Amino acid sequence: MSTPDPFIQTLRDFIGNKKIGLVGCNCAEARFAEDFVAHSWLNHSVYGDGVEMIKMLNDRKYLCDPKMFESYFHSTMFDMVHPDLASNKTFGAIIRVLIGNKSKGVGIGELLLPLIVNGWTRGKNEGDGFVLGGKREVKNADGASIKPIESGITDKGLVDTLNKEYMFGLVPVKKKHAQLISKLGKNVTEVFTNYFKKLWPTFDATDMIKELSKNWSDADFFNTTVGQHMLAQYQKIDNWKSLVVVSGEDDLEIVNIPNPLNSEILEHISFSTRFSRLKDTHAVPDGYCVLKLVKNKKPKEKKLESCIKCCIVHI
């Protein structure tokens, strides 16, 4: 019989350490642990630097400083950690795989962040993670639904009824937005005040309407303003300290948003408000918005050779 590779046991011991908050009964967590061992062993076999990777992952000085999450930032998974860890070829290969581990109730990046952020722990009953005592909400950069009010307060399809009642059957922010504002005339502020009150009964839209009054007819301004205020309301509803937007593509970008009303976030975040339900089956309440990451224009990094991707075997 062949002698078992001692590095495999090292990998299993590391990922089995519950202090990093990865192992549990969730199937995504189990798959994460399996993928960590398999891909680490495979890439170490190719690059020969897996042992050094484990040493650095066990040393907090190589991990992301949790204080980063106290303020707004736009970065990549590689730039967040120590340069020595970021340049480790095994590390660079496995995190591109591990970031995609997800299942029902476990989103993209949620299982990877405890691995690379010093002190990051996973929420057991609520929240996607905690660091420095603050609850963090992790969202997919490809599109995350943001709810303006708690679920169940209004009926789905209410927004379509209100569009007929207040908006002449037109939809705010759509192609005929300027035409809608023109038809509302001097009553635009009063009409939208009543519209939002019925659409979002628990959302105090006073500050948002004051901001919108600066330029009602600009659809882009309307969309962005509503999106930011909706995100601020979502923060109040779920009581998170920052929203962490994670991309599983290219440079593995990440954006941390502690203050949704900070204009700085608009450089990297876009909003798409949805003031129409029709055949939309999303579970979120009417009048929600979709948040996305504005793609980084940096050159793409080379990906692992396809032969490596095809060589994963059960260990």
Image (spheres, grey):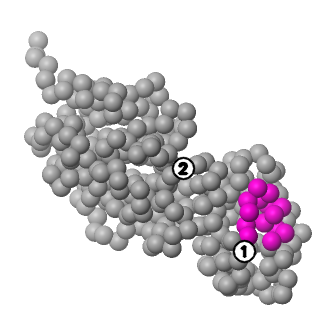
User: Residue under circle 1?
Assistant: 209
Q: Amino acid at mark 1?
A: Ile
Q: Answer whether residue 205 is visible to the viewer in this image.
A: yes
Is 236 one of the magenta-colored residues?
no
Q: Closer to the camera, 197 or 280? A: 197
Q: Answer whether residue 140 is visible to the viewer in this image.
A: no
Q: Are marks 2 and 1 in contact (CB under 8 Å)?
A: no
38 w.r.t. 1: above or below: below
Q: Which residues are magenta?
A: 193-206
242 w.r.t. 300: above or below: above
Instruction: Give the residue at x 48% y 36%.
Output: 123
Q: Is residue 276 left or right of residue 90?
A: right
Q: Pick the quarter of the image with the N terminus.
A: top left
Q: How many other residues sit within 10 Å of disc 1, few (<14), some (14-19) or many (≥20)?
A: many
Is 203 one of the magenta-colored residues?
yes
Task: Give the quadrant of residue 300.
Answer: bottom left
Instruction: Give the residue at x 13% y 36%.
Output: 51
149 w.r.t. 52: above or below: below
Q: Is residue 295 left or right of residue 238?
A: left
Instruction: Give the residue at x 68% y 64%.
Output: 274
Residue 61 horizontal/vertical position (percent): 20, 46
User: Residue under circle 2?
Assistant: 240
Q: How many other residues sit within 10 Å of disc 2, few (<14), some (14-19) or many (≥20)?
A: some
Q: Amino acid at mark 2?
A: Trp
Q: Which mark is residue 37?
A: none
